[in-house]
Image: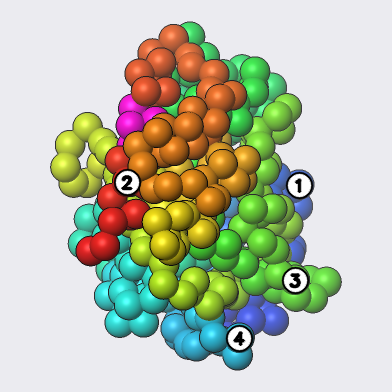
Amino acid sequence: MQTFEIKRADNIDNAIKAGATSQTAQQGADVRFLAGGTTLIDLMKLNVETPQQVIDITRLPLDKIEPSSDGGLKIGATVRNADLAHDERVQRDYPVLSQALLAGASAQLRNMATTGGNLLQRTRCVYFRDDAMACNKRKPGSGCAAIGGFNRNLAILGTSEQCIATNPSDMNVALMALDATIHIHGIKGERAVPIAEFYLLPGNTPDKETVMQPGDLITHVTLPPPPKGSRSLYLKLRDRASYEFALASAAVIMTVNNGKIEKAQFAMGGVGTRPWRNKDAEARLIGQAPDKASFQAAAEAFLKDAKPQSENGFKVELAKRCLVHTLDAASKPA
Ligand SMILES: Cc1cc2nc3c(=O)[nH]c(=O)nc-3n(C[C@H](O)[C@H](O)[C@H](O)COP(=O)(O)OP(=O)(O)OC[C@H]3O[C@@H](n4cnc5c(N)ncnc54)[C@H](O)[C@@H]3O)c2cc1C
Ligand code: SF4
């Protein structure tokens, strides 16, 4: 590990100013905010993240979960994953978010991990985490060792010739299905970014993962009011039952009325280079009976553009089954 300077931010403005002193364009790679540290410190030990300055943001007043004026929920960026998962409003109104959080990592990690850090966690592609290997995400222009290499757990949707890494988060899949908004405070002021626009596809610049700019601080996330009469569910399929990242996961929110699907919002994890949503697949369900044929048609539409690599072809069928099963379970009364 390289030497670095660590500072504690005492207010939001100072954190942003310190963050914006970054000298590089690569998402401010020489200055990093420290929240739970469960991604950042790991990657610093591996020499993958090499910031010269680390700014501890854990004392900023961003640790509240509050109702928002429109009937939704406001979640501070430093709210710990465990606190969010066990919040009674989240469990009652957004159970899919609570379930996704509890499916992630371990109890110890969830006690440390934060909302902002989870949104910005990095891929688990093994080559990204090994600084001896070619990786365009870690070192632009160096190549992609995963294409033709070990790619069993990598993406089948949204890939490019430069990168096929998945976004590994569970929480982000639920936030994507829930239409969350990310609130960012930067050197030029505040802005609100719908989660659907927050993550970038890898294209030719896989090192650029989000719309975040140097100095940008995520302050909070908002959720719209919970859809009335909806049911929701998160299902995660993985190699072992706990402490493992998703091979495929699905977050579903569905409203069924008089035997017809009135509303369906869903996203998948473990399959895309970002938490994946496909509005065309959702539209196919509206007005349909909640049966296996409708769900299978939606799953086919969802995976239509899947592009498997040498080792992860099994994910296409696995993802379809994961989605059909979750849609079916969510469509039935608890
Ligand atoms: C062994 C292991 C298993 C895991 N398993 C899972 C799993 O199954 N599912 C899953 O979803 N996750 C899993 N994780 C990942 C874990 O959820 C993330 O590491 C965690 O959510 C990151 O949050 P943090 O607060 O610790 O982030 P940090 O490590 O503190 O920060 C991560 C990044 O976000 C930036 N950052 C943090 N907060 C802000 C902010 N407010 N504004 C701007 N930038 C910010 C940091 O600068 C850094 O670049 C696992 C992690 C480990 C180590
Ligand atoms: S898939 Fe992406 S993260 Fe993995 S080696 Fe290739 S460029 Fe790097």
Can you tell which of label 3 and label 1 is closer to the viewer? 3
Please check the rendered image and state whether residue 264 is part of the magenta-colored stretch, yes or no. Answer: no
Instruction: Determine the residue located farthest toward the right in the rendered image.
Output: 188
Question: Residue 201: x, y in percent?
Answer: 66, 37
The residue wearing badge 3 is 191
Type of residue at label 4? Asp
Type of residue at label 2? Asp
Type of residue at label 3? Arg
Q: Residues within 10 Å of mark 2 (few under 14, many from 20)?
A: some
Can you tell which of label 4 and label 3 is closer to the viewer? 4
Can you tell which of label 1 and label 4 is closer to the viewer? 4
Q: CA distance from mark 1 to mark 4?
A: 37 Å
Type of residue at label 1? Ala
Residues 216 and 300: in front is: 300
Tell me if the residue at label 3 has its CB under 8 Å from ligand 1.
Answer: no
CB-based contact (under 8 Å), mark 3 and mark 1? no
The residue wearing badge 1 is 25
Please tell me which of labels 3 and 1 falls first in the chain.
1
The residue wearing badge 2 is 328
